Amino acid sequence: MKIAVSSQNQTNVTAHLGRCQKFWVYDVDETTIQNKQVLQLTKDQSFHESSPKDSHPLDTVQVLISGSMGRGLARRLESKGIQPVITSETDPDTAITTYLAGSLVVSTPEDHAHDHEAGNDHEGECGCNQETI
């Protein structure tokens, strides 16, 4: 199974999935990490910039873990057969191991406030279903 974790700085789980361009992609079995590598997206490939209708480099993962995402982005992932997982865990490796153990503390997209920078006019393209401030 493949699990991606948003990690813009390659150290912590990134909070805003829509703008993230760096992901750890883990190959795992039922209980352990087999391999891990960084996937670098271009700005155009970020979820905020890309179309839900197009193929995406993360389409091959079964689970995507992030610090936050909007309901629209969660639905976008689900429509591609990817389980969206939101957690407050900040360490990517710990997020994976606790997910595999079934003990990762998760929340739903509705639990997260989704702030956009003032002047960000993406008109819902990311699927976050939030109005700009």
Image (tube, rainbow, N blue to C red):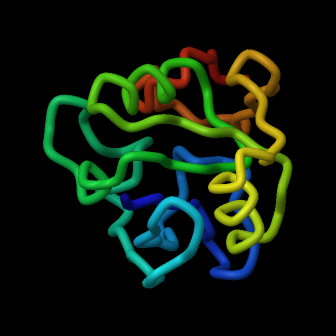
Q: Which of the 4 image quadrants contains residue 44?
A: bottom left
Residue drawn at point x = 81 percent, y = 25 percent: 113
Q: Using residue 121 as the reference point, say whether residue 90 is left or right of it.
A: right
Vertical placement of 60 versus 87: above or below? below
Q: Which of the 4 image quadrants contains residue 35?
A: bottom left
Residue drawn at point x = 73 percent, y = 51 percent: 15
* Residue 30 in picture, x, y percent from top left: 51, 59
User: In front here: 8 or 89?
Assistant: 89
* Residue 121 in picture, x, y percent from top left: 51, 30
Identify the residue at the far left of this view: 54
* Residue 91 in picture, x, y percent from top left: 79, 70
> The N terminus lies in which quarter of the figure?
bottom left
Q: Which of the 4 image quadrants contains residue 132?
A: top right
* Residue 56 in picture, x, y percent from top left: 23, 50
Vertical placement of 85 versus 17: above or below? above
Identify the residue at the far front of this view: 30
Residue drawn at point x = 61 percent, y = 71 percent: 8
